[in-house]
Amino acid sequence: MDVDVRPADVDESRCEDEAPEAYVRRLAFAKADAIVRVGEPRAVLGADTIVVIDGEVLGKPADATDARRMLGVLSGRRHVVLTGVTLIGPLEVAEEGNPRPWLTRVSATAVEFADLTRDDLEWYLASGEPMGKAGAYAIQGLASRFVTRIDGSYANVVGLPVSDVHEMCRALGILIS
């Protein structure tokens, strides 16, 4: 199966009073739909991941100061990683006059962090890894040393709940080899 990775040009701003699950669901659909709208006939997958703690949504940090703040909030605490995924079926399976079939799911994984020392924070920030990562960390990278427990899908925390995607492909009749 050929796969292309294309960034979707969508506004990732959260709407006022938008619940975290609704937010990632909306963004996943918007990203997939943006690629379909430019004429992609193949199946399209859109995804978005956020970290939620005490109702606060932590997306990608704006800068090192924001990353330091996020990691400080996560230190020694449990949070939830939400990933919204939308799969839009290929054009060939759409019926005349009807839209292409699509599915959206949200996967949730609870993650516990160790207490981070000032040295831990400064070392991790100096690595540059927190930038561009929801919640300012990558579980599959250097931050793995800070994760004391997860409850749910590890792949979800990385940013793509693969088992959900597999089930969605099956449901839409998309064969994966």
Image: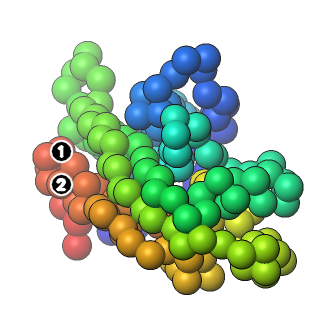
Badge 2 density bin: few <14, some 14–19, many ≥20, Cα 10 Å: few
Could you say which quadrant of the image residue 15 lies in? top right
Q: Which mark is residue 172?
A: 1
The disc at residue 167 is 2
Image height check: is 11 above or below 162? above
Amino acid type, residue under disc 1 in the picture:
Leu
Which residue corresponds to the image point at 41% horizontal and 43% vertical from the top-left? 84
Which quarter of the image is occupied by the C terminus? Answer: bottom left
Residue 65 percent location from the top left of the image? 85, 55
Question: Which residue is rendered at x = 29% and y = 62% of the image?
Answer: 152
Q: Are marks 2 and 1 in contact (CB under 8 Å)?
A: no
Across and down, in percent, residue 41 comes to 40, 43
Q: Amino acid at mark 2?
A: Glu
Whichever of labels 2 and 1 marks the residue nearer the N terminus, that label is 2
Q: Position of residue 127 (x, y in %)?
A: 78, 79
- Residue 136 quadrant: bottom right
User: Which of these two is toward me, 48 or 138?
Assistant: 138
